Image (tube, rainbow, N blue to C red):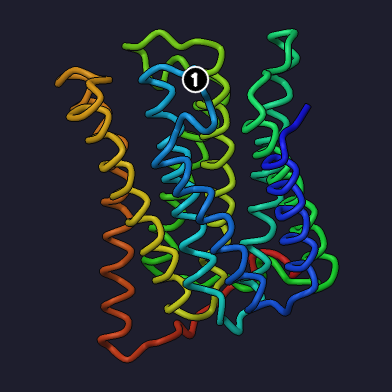
């Protein structure tokens, strides 16, 4: 039987998403940034809230998931006032695909293990993702936001294409070969599921990277680069906690895992070109070519 606290927090969650679905675009982007951001902070500070009986490796993976979610939330917050519908459409479509794959991964893990976890916090979080999925569909139908359109040529777009490939293949490897990503640690069933969830988040991020070249304003692109740099920084913090405080990895493993920060160097190159455009007075690039029709 659920206790009174469980009933109250479930009702608050449902009420928050129902209320949020009725808000205007700027308001719901801000509200969801705060709501999902609080969840991500909770994952980072209290990884046991997702996996109660998890070991040190599971704590690291849950914190990593929280760091990735915080990076996504930061992008929502920084672009909440944009006038470019392609930005909002990209965020919503990436959210839709990411959540669908995440839910598919979770329930596929349940199916393989032939048992459902008894952790009520996990079920509560799944309820939250289901309502976030519902709100995403609602915004897409109501707003009819465009995705793609005219892509800007130039070095920034090249950087974003490279970053898309990095995120896309990293996400696929996390979902298809989770044990290869951390080869020096034995992965339990829950570890494998969390690794695949992380892969789903990375896959959703790759969708954003693919469509960012069609964003017209360099300010929106800068917001994306900043969110990815912060994500890399949070990954380093998560790794430092696992090594210095919890002792999850030895020195060799600690150094090897830092290779995951290499993609942030690509982002720094993109930030340099954005800065150069701003210095030259080119707020928006003038040359375009059509890649896809708006949907």
Q: Is residue 283 visible?
A: yes
Does residue 261 appear to the left or right of 108 in the view shown? left
Which residue lies most toward the left here? 251
In this rendering, the answer to whether 28 lies above or below 59 is below
At x 39%, y 41%, the residue is: 45
| Residue 295 visible in the shown view | no
* Residue 102 vertical position relative to residue 67 in the rendered view, above or below: above
- Residue shown at 22%/35% (left/top)? 240
Q: Nearer the viewer, residue 108 or 176?
A: 108
Q: In which quarter of the image is the C terminus?
A: bottom right
Which residue: 77% across, 60% down? 15
- Residue 238 place in picture, x, y as percent: 31, 38
- Residue lying at 70% horizontally and 32% vertically, measured from the top left: 123
Q: In this view, does 93 lie to the left or right of 279?
A: right
Q: Is residue 257 above or below residue 178?
A: below
Q: Is residue 291 above or below residue 62?
A: below
Q: Quadrant of residue 262?
A: top left
Residue at the disc numbered 1: 178
Task: Return the x and y of residue 119 as percentages of the image width and height.
Answer: 63, 24
What secondary structure is found at the residue carrying circle 1?
Answer: helix
Residue 175, picture quadrant: top right
């Amino acid at each position: 039987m659920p206790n009174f606290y469980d009933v109250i927090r479930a009702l608050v969650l449902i009420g928050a998403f129902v209320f949020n679905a009725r808000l205007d675009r700027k308001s719901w982007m801000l509200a969801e940034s705060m709501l999902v951001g609080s969840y991500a902070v909770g994952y980072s500070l209290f990884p046991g809230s997702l996996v109660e009986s998890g070991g040190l490796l599971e704590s690291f993976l849950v914190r990593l998931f929280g760091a990735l979610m915080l990076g996504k939330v930061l992008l929502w917050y920084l672009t909440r006032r944009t006038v470019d519908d392609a930005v909002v459409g990209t965020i919503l479509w990436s959210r839709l695909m990411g959540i669908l794959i995440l839910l598919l991964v979770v329930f596929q893990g349940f199916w393989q293990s032939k048992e459902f976890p008894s952790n009520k916090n996990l079920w509560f979080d799944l309820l939250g993702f289901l309502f976030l999925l519902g709100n995403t569909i609602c915004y897409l139908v109501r707003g009819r936001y465009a995705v793609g359109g005219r892509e800007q040529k130039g070095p920034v777009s090249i950087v974003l294409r490279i970053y898309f490939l990095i995120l896309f293949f990293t996400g696929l490897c996390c979902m298809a070969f989770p044990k290869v990503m951390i080869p020096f640690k034995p992965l339990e069933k829950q570890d494998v599921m969390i690794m695949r969830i992380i892969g789903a988040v990375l896959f959703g991020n790759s969708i954003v990277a693919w469509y960012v070249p069609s964003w017209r304003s360099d300010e929106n692109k800068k917001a994306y680069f900043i969110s990815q740099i912060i994500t890399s920084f949070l990954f380093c913090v998560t790794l430092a906690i696992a090594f210095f405080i919890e002792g999850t990895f030895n020195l060799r493993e600690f150094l090897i895992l830092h290779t995951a920060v290499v993609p942030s160097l690509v982002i720094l190159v993109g930030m340099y070109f954005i800065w150069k455009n701003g210095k030259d007075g080119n707020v928006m690039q003038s040359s375009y070519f059509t890649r896809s029709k708006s949907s």
